[in-house]
Image (cartoon, rainbow, N blue to C red):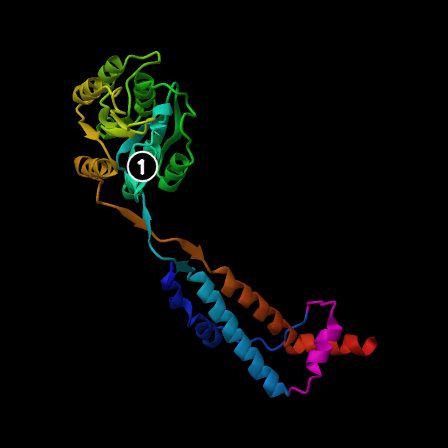
Amino acid sequence: MIEFLWPMAALILPLPLLVYFVIPKSKKQEAALLVPFYQTAAAFDNAGISPNGRHFMRRLLLILCWLALVLALSRPQWIGESIELPTNGRDLLLAVDISGSMGTEDMVLNRQKITRLEIVKQVIGDFVERRKGDRLGLILFGTEAYLQTPLTFDRSTVRSLLEETPVGIAGGKTAIGDAIGLAIKRLHERPADSRVVILLTDGRNNVGEVDPIKAAQIAAKEGVKIYTIGFGADELVVPGLIFNRTINPSAELDEEVLSLIAETTGGIYQRARDSSELSDIYEALDELEPIEQDRETYRPVKSLYFWPLAFALLISFLIILTHPQITIWFRRQAGRS
C-alpha cells in the first residue's frame, strides 16, 4: 500500500490562492527566456487554440504542477508485505559423522535398504527447516573435522550442503573429540546462554588429537551444551553362501563415551536404531531447546516521490511553452527563419 511520510505537506495546498489574492499583479513582464527549439513551440502556438483556450490550459497545467509538487513533498512511499526477521535464537551447531561406516545399508525406507547417511540427511533436513530464528552451523567429521557451514540464519544453505555431502569425504575413521573441539572454537564468542551442539555418530573415537571426554569438559566450562545421538541398527542380515547370518552393525558404537559427553555438558544422550527413532529424537530436541516465539517483522519501503516530481517538471516545461510572451517570441523567431 501507499503511505505518506510527510502528510502535513497537504496544508500548503491553498498557498497559490493566498499568493494570488495578496500579492499585487504586475502590469508588464519582459520575456527573458531564450529557447532554441522555437520551431516546435511556434507549431504549438499555431495549432488553432484560442487565447482563452491557452489561458485555460495554462491554469490547468499550473494546478497540476502544484498538486504534483505537493504530492512529491509529502514523500509518498510504497510499503510492501511484512517480512519476518530472524530472531536472536540459539547458536546451534550440527556435528554429523560422515565416516565410512555411515555408508552401511542397515536402514529401511519405503521397503528399500538405504544408508545411514541418507536417513540422517532427511531427518536433519526437516529439523533444520523447523529451526526458524536459530543460527545454524554444520560440522562434518570423519578422520578430520571441518566446518561445512558457519553459523547462519540461511537454513536452506545448511540443508543443501548437508544433502550434497557424500560418505567418507572427511576420511573413514571417527574423530569425535576434534569435532567437539571445533564446535567449541566456533561458539566461543557467541552468547553463553545459547550455545548448543547436536552430535550424531555411529561409532567410537578412534582418531584425532583431542580426547572426547576432555573436549566435553572444556565445553562444559565454556557453557556449551552437547546432545549426543548414537545411530545405527542393532541387527543386520548378511547373506552367506548357504545360510544368512545376523550381525550387529553398531558393535563399534561407544554409548558409554557419548553418554558421558552429554552428562558432562548438561545435554542428553539418546539412541536411534531406525529413521523413526531418529526423527522422534530431533522432535524431542525441539522441545528441549525451544525456539523463541517473539519475532520481529519489517515491511520493505520504496520511495515514490520522484514520480510526481518528474511529472511536475514535465508540466512546467509545457507551461513555459504556453506562456504568451514566450509564444510571441517563438512566432517572431519562426517568421525570421
Instruction: Give the residue displayed 38% in from the left and 18% down from the top.
Output: 143
Tell me where residue 315 appears, x and y as whole percent.
Answer: 57, 71
- Against 105, residue 263 (above or below) is above
Residue 281, horizontal then vertical, whole percent: 20, 35
Q: Quadrant of residue 93?
A: top left
Q: In which quarter of the view is residue 257 placed?
A: top left
- Tag 1: amino acid: Ile
Magenta stretch holds residue 200 = no
Left or right of 303 in this view: 91: left
State the quadrant of the N terminus.
Answer: bottom left
In the visual, does 39 lie left or right of 70? right
Please provide the residue range marked out in magenta.
Answer: 32-49
Tell me residue 260's x, y (percent).
Answer: 18, 18
Residue occupying the point 65% across, 74% down: 321
Where in the figure is residue 295, as x and y percent of width and height? 26, 46
The residue indicated by pointer 1 is 119
Quadrant occupied by the C terminus:
bottom right
